[in-house]
Image (spheres, rainbow, N blue to C red):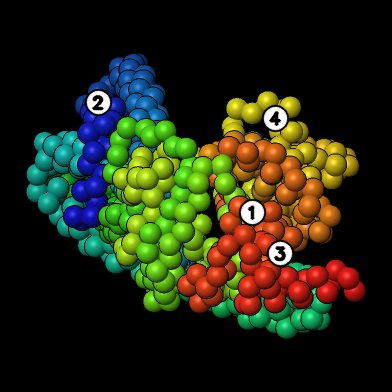
Amino acid sequence: MKHLKHLNKYFYKYKWKLISGLVITIAARIFAIYYIPLIGDSTNVIEDYIKGEITELSVVRSELAYNIMIIVGATLISAFFTFLMRQTFIVVSRHMEFDLKNEVYRHYQDLSLNFYKKNRTGDLMNRISEDVSKVRMYLGPAIMYSVTTFTSTVVVLIYMIDAAPELTLYTVIPLPVLSYAIYKLSVDIHKRSTVVQQYLSRLNTFTQESFSGIAVIKSYGMEQHTNSDFVELSNGSRDKNLDLVKVQAFFFPLMVLLIGISNILVIYIGGRKYLNGEIENLGVIVEFLLYVNMLTWPVASIGWVTSLVQQASASQQRINEFLDEKPEITNKKSSEDNIKGAIAFKDVSFTYDDTNITALRNISFEVKNGETLAIIGKTGAGKSTILELIGRLYDVEEGEITIDGRNIQNLNLDSLRKSIGYVPQDAFLFSDSIKNNIKFGKTNAIEEEIYEAAKNASVHKNIVNFSKGYDTVLGERGITLSGGQKQRVSIARAIIHDPEILLFDDCLSAVDTETEEEILNNLFKISQNKTTIIISHRISSAKNADKIIILEDGRIVQQGTHSQLINETGYYKELYAKQLNEKEM
Ligand SMILES: Nc1ncnc2c1ncn2[C@@H]1O[C@H](COP(=O)(O)OP(=O)(O)OP(=O)(O)O)[C@@H](O)[C@H]1O
């Protein structure tokens, strides 16, 4: 239960709505019960007529007509209040669910990359959807049914004790048993449905992966194999579903059985008391039958609600685990910074926490504002790590990275990130239109700016050739761009952002050398007063840079300009010779 404390702030936020829900529920219950004594009364009138205590049929008629009117009126009012009750409690729970989802989502966004490496996307999604839904069952139905149960029980018991105290005692005896049995059943149902849920999520992941990787499956002729894996999984899923259905099937029969026992007790004990003259009228027995039936659902719901609260508590615990995670990268300065973009690494070493791989060792270099630095090196040399550190996707512990002479950890984080246009190695595009993907870099960009950015990234011509042009939808719902096109849309996104610092991580690898040349020329014009860092495996991307550094195993092994490096024995000269040869061939 302690995990659910986190939600108290939401109860406080919606306190007035909840209090009005409470008042409405009490009113609904009072009106729902109000008519029962009238039914007892009507039975008594008929009984008195049969016994001859009332001789006028017209008296019976008018008494019954009056009772019926009140019964219909009270039922309608009760129905109206019940409608309002659901509208209040369930609507409030939907608001709370919305708030909680937003809270979790905002927190996810603040968390650092390390958190995303440690936790699987499926798990993140489950906690924000499945777990939040389970918590909503506590915020809405569980609270609503608890209030209903409490008010119904109190009001019904008052009426019952007033009518026949001893009979009340006998008839309510089976009800706690009913509540306990439903609780036990609900716990079992919960256990089984968790397993069903797990199977479902495995089945979903499997199908999703199979369809995403359909090209690989088909080209290796693995359809049969994949199909039998699917059948095996879905057989398991069906069996678990059947297990669940079996237990669920007990729910209503159990309720009917226990209500039946209560009814028999009312008739048996009530009947004997009537015959002994301890109860004056048959109407009391009729009333009691109605009371017992009216108590059944609230009492049964105690068991159900207990299990809902337990599930919600387990879910909230999982949500809290993530909410308690502190972002590793924090903003230490609230006021904004004006960034020009001169970057310097001073003796920076960096080891990834999770793999313990030391990606950078004693790295020092400087790029002045407006200059271009190219980084070349074999795969795994630490090139991408340098760019990630500049954007503070990770913080360095050894050495210092400065921008405009200030340690980046002391700069306003938002200003820092806004001053950077980063094109990662795997160009990621959203399942949205090309236009919106480019606008991601500048949400208020006008059409002309989008076209300009796309032209500078040499992708405009490709885009206008699509039948829907810039409105072409990408990804699952639309077309798939070629690797080179993706990279160029991603470059356009960085260009439109118009940042002070441009970071390109091997993002021209999938374009042909001619287009590469074209983009580099455009970039050269755009980035006159920007600081640019280009990572590449090609000399052609690096040769015009003001400075080139060669990384090997996390260390800078050579640095200089193109003309210096081609005359110096080492990796750059070898690469140059190799790529020159390839070009000539
Ligand atoms: N997120 C990460 N978590 C743990 N280790 C990582 C992570 N990213 C990179 N590494 C490791 O750090 C080392 C440097 O990786 P990095 O991506 O910086 O190399 P790179 O020079 O950019 O390589 P490539 O040219 O293949 O992109 C590698 O050994 C890599 O396995």
Q: Is residue 456 left or right of residue 281?
A: right
Mark 4: few/some/many CA within 10 Å (<14, 14-19, 20+) = some
Q: Residue at x 26, y 31 (%)?
A: 13
- The residue beneath circle 4 is 449
Mark sitting earlier along the chain (1/2) = 2
The kind of secondary structure element at disc 2 is helix
Q: Disc 2 marks which amino acid?
A: Trp
Where is residue 92? Give x, y as percent: 35, 34
Residue nearest the observer in this picture, 268 or 430: 430
Q: Residue at x 68, y 69 (%)?
A: 566
Q: Is residue 219 left or right of residue 319?
A: right
Q: Disc 1 marks which amino acid?
A: Ala
Residue 330 visible somewhere in the drawing: yes
Residue 44 visible somewhere in the drawing: no
- Cβ–Cβ under 8 Å for marks 3 and 4: no
Q: Residue at x 82, y 59 (%)?
A: 512
Residue nearest the observer in this picture, 569 or 123: 569
Eye-nearest disc, 3 or 4: 3
- The residue beneath circle 1 is 545
Where is residue 338? Give x, y as percent: 42, 33
Query: Which of the 4 image quadrants contains residue 581?
Result: bottom right
- The residue beneath circle 3 is 539
| Whole-number angstrom distance, CA of label 4 to CA of label 2 | 49 Å
Eye-nearest disc, 4 or 2: 4
The kind of secondary structure element at disc 1 is loop
Rendered view: 202 above or below 417 = below
Q: Residue at x 15, y 54 (%)?
A: 170
The kind of secondary structure element at disc 4 is helix
- The residue beneath circle 2 is 16
Mark 1: few/some/many CA within 10 Å (<14, 14-19, 20+) = many
Eye-nearest disc, 1 or 4: 1
